Image: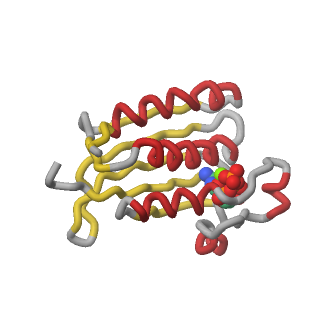
Amino acid sequence: KPLDLTAHLERIVDDVKYEAEETGLEIRLSTTSRPVTVMADARRITQVFINLLTNAIRYTPEGGKISVVIQDKVVDRNAVYTCVSVIDTGIGIPAEELAHLFDRFYRVEKARSRHTGGTGLGLSIVHHFVRAHGGFIRVVSEPGQGTTFTVYLPINNDL
Ligand code: ATP
Ligand code: MG
C-alpha cells in the first residue's frame, strides 16, 4: 500500500522525542520534498525506524544530536530509491565490527553494551524488513564521532 513516508516519520519522531529529550538529546526531522510516498507496510516501517532511533538514543551521550533526513529519488546503480538516514553524534562503531552488525544477537563489545541492556536483535530485524521491501541499508560510522544508517527503499513508479 502507498505510505506517506514524511507524515509517518513525523509521527515516529514525535513518539521518541520525549525519550530523546529526557536523555538530553536533540532530535529533528528534515525532508527536501513532500509528500514522499513509498510502497511499504506501515507497521514494519515503524519497527525499522523505532529500532534505528532507539539505538541512536541509546548510543549517543547527553548533549548529542539525532537527525532523520528523508531524500526523495536517490539514484544508486541505475535504480531509484527513497532514502531515510538516521544520523547520530554518538559513540560510533569500530570498522571491524560493521560486517557483523546485522547478525542476530550481535552486540558490539559486549562489555560496553551490557549495561544498556539490549538483546542484539534490533538491527537483524531492521535488515530483514528492509530487504523484504526490496531495499537495502548502509552504515557509515566513525568511533567517537557518530553513526549514520541509511535505509534505501525502492521507488515504485506504478504508484
Ligand atoms: P536490541 O536492539 O535488541 O535492544 P541492541 O541495540 O544491542 O539490542 P542492535 O540494535 O542489533 O542490538 O545493535 C547491535 C549493536 O550495534 C549494539 O549492541 C551496539 O553496540 C551497536 N549499535 C547499533 N546502533 C548503534 C549506534 N547508532 N551507535 C553506536 N553503536 C550502535
Ligand atoms: Mg537496538
Residue 139 shows in the view: no
Q: Nearer the viewer, residue 65 or 149?
A: 149
Query: Which quadrant holds residue 80?
Result: bottom left
Locate residue 134 relative to residue 93 in the image: left or right: left
Q: Nearer the viewer, residue 113 or 105?
A: 105
Give me the residue at 21% from left, 55% from top. 156
Give me the residue at 63% from left, 31% from top. 20
Image: 13 above or below 143:
above
Q: How many marks?
A: 0
Quadrant placement of the N terminus: top left
Give me the residue at 66% from left, 59% from top. 121
| Residue 104: x %, y % from top left | 66, 67
Give me the residue at 44% from left, 49% from top. 85
Q: Residue furthest left?
A: 158
Q: Nearer the viewer, residue 119 or 13?
A: 119
Image: 19 above or below 5:
above
| Residue 54: x %, y % from top left | 62, 43
| Residue 92: x %, y % from top left | 64, 56
The colour scheme used to paint the residues is: secondary structure
Q: Nearer the viewer, residue 64 or 121?
A: 121
Residue 11 shows in the view: yes
Locate residue 66 relative to residue 135 in the image: left or right: right
| Residue 108: x %, y % from top left | 72, 64
